[in-house]
């Protein structure tokens, strides 16, 4: 069986209509616009409305990516999310149905904020082995639905959103080709980023009150330290595999976790600050949606032109991390 490369041929993004500014948060918590901006670089974030779920924004991003690619059907849909509509079943088949992608293979993948890179690697593998000729890869999360309403720190950081790319089988020398991926994890760090209750380890009990364990929790200082180290090492590994030096990278798109993390990783890898793309100021940390949403914004802003060398990297719960290198296509 001939091995094909996975080639980007479409990109799209979506954020919910409802906006929460730093001023809005200052009215609810003991905080200020200056405090939030100085620590995160975030000015505002978008959140889903009551009754709106992850699949709804995933569909909007997926539809935009399909329009960008100029196609109406794919063989596979891979949805990276840690906030599915339901614990069971997966949300990807619902997304595929709403997009009219009847009978496409569809599954969810959870690597939290590293989810999109994992999903990209999975879809690349489907194409490389000939199991699919085309794939829609979506990163979508509605973290506002799992945050502790009393936690000022996570409320300031996280927003909701979705981003998507379309891949097709092609040649490794084509603009848009995914050239290399790097993935890794460290289960010893699982407690750094977690929703501890509601799964099989700590199941829901009839009549028991909802506890803090049902909300998302994060150890910020430790996450910062490990995120910078793991993202930097993974990015360097991918650069080594494709034979690029840091100055060869035209656009560095890291997981939009925190402005300081992005700057630290760029400096550690050796990427010039003007080549580090960020949109965190306007959307916050959108978890699995972060990288594809940033790619959609970067393409719209003209920061991505055909043939440009693009480096992606992310770190998320698990702990899991990953990176990928590609050249940008004509879209």
Image (cartoon, rainbow, N blue to C red):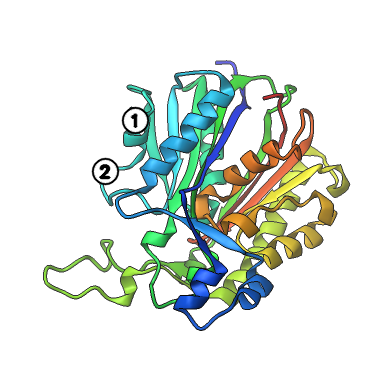
Residue at 26% from the left image edge and 47% from the top image edge: 88
Given this view, does label 1 or label 2 mark the residue nearer the observer? 1
SS for callout 1 = helix
**51 left or right, relative to 279:** left
Q: Give whichever of 292, 35 is nearer the camera.
A: 35
Q: Quadrant of residue 92?
A: top left
Quarter of the image containing the N terminus?
A: top right
In the image, residue 296 lies at what x, y percent? Answer: 62, 39
**Residue occupied by mark 2:** 89
Q: Do the residues labelled 1 and 2 touch (CB within 8 Å)?
A: no
Q: Give whichever of 146, 319 is nearer the camera.
A: 146
State whether residue 59 appears in this view: yes
Residue furthest out toward the left = 207
Residue at 68% from the left image edge and 37% from the top image edge: 300
Separation of residues labelled 1 and 2 (CA atoms): 15 Å
Residue furthest out toward the right = 247
Residue at 43% from the left image edge and 31% from the top image edge: 77
Residue furthest out toward the top = 1
Q: Residue 253, relative to residue 177: is it above or below?
A: below
In the image, residue 294 lies at what x, y percent? Answer: 63, 46
Q: Give whichever of 38, 222 is nearer the camera.
A: 38
The first of marks 1 and 2 along the sequence is 2
In the image, residue 67 lies at what x, y percent? Answer: 53, 24
SS for callout 2 = loop
Residue at 59% from the left image edge and 16% from the top image edge: 2
Counting the numbered discs, the total is 2
**Mark 1 crowdedness (10 Å alpha carbons): few <14, some 14-19, many ≥20:** some
Quarter of the image containing the C terminus?
A: top right
Q: Give whichever of 18, 281 is nearer the camera.
A: 18
**Residue occupied by mark 1:** 98
In the image, residue 277 lies at what x, y percent? Answer: 73, 50
């Amino acid at each position: 069986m001939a091995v094909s490369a996975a080639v980007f041929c479409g990109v799209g993004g979506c954020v919910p209509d409802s906006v929460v500014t730093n001023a809005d948060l200052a009215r609810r918590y003991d905080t200020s616009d200056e405090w939030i901006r100085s620590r995160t670089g975030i000015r505002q974030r978008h959140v889903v409305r009551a009754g709106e779920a992850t699949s709804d924004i995933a569909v909007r991003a997926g539809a935009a990516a399909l329009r960008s690619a100029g196609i109406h059907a794919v063989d596979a849909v891979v949805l990276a999310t840690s906030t599915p509509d339901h614990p069971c079943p997966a949300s990807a088949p619902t997304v595929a149905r709403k997009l009219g992608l009847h009978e496409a293979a569809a599954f969810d993948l959870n690597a939290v904020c590293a989810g999109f890179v994992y999903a990209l690697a999975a879809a690349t593998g489907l194409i490389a082995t000939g199991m699919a000729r085309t794939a829609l890869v979506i990163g979508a999360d509605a973290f506002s639905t799992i945050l502790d309403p009393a936690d000022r720190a996570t409320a300031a950081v996280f927003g909701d959103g979705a981003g998507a790319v379309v891949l097709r089988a092609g040649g490794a020398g084509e603009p848009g080709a995914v050239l290399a991926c790097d993935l890794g994890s460290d289960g010893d760090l699982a407690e750094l980023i977690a929703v501890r209750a509601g799964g099989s380890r700590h199941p829901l009990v009839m009549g028991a009150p909802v506890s803090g364990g049902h909300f998302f929790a994060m150890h910020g200082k430790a996450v910062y330290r490990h995120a910078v180290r793991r993202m930097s090492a993974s990015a360097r590994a991918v650069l080594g595999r494709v034979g690029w030096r840091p100055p060869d990278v035209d656009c560095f798109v890291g997981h939009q976790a925190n402005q300081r993390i992005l700057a630290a990783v760029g400096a550690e890898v050796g990427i010039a600050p003007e080549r580090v793309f960020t949109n965190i100021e306007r959307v916050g940390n959108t978890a699995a949606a972060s990288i594809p949403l940033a790619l959609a914004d970067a393409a719209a802003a003209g920061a991505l032109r055909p043939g440009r060398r693009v480096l992606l990297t992310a770190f998320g719960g698990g702990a899991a991390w990953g990176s990928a290198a590609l050249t940008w296509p004509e879209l």
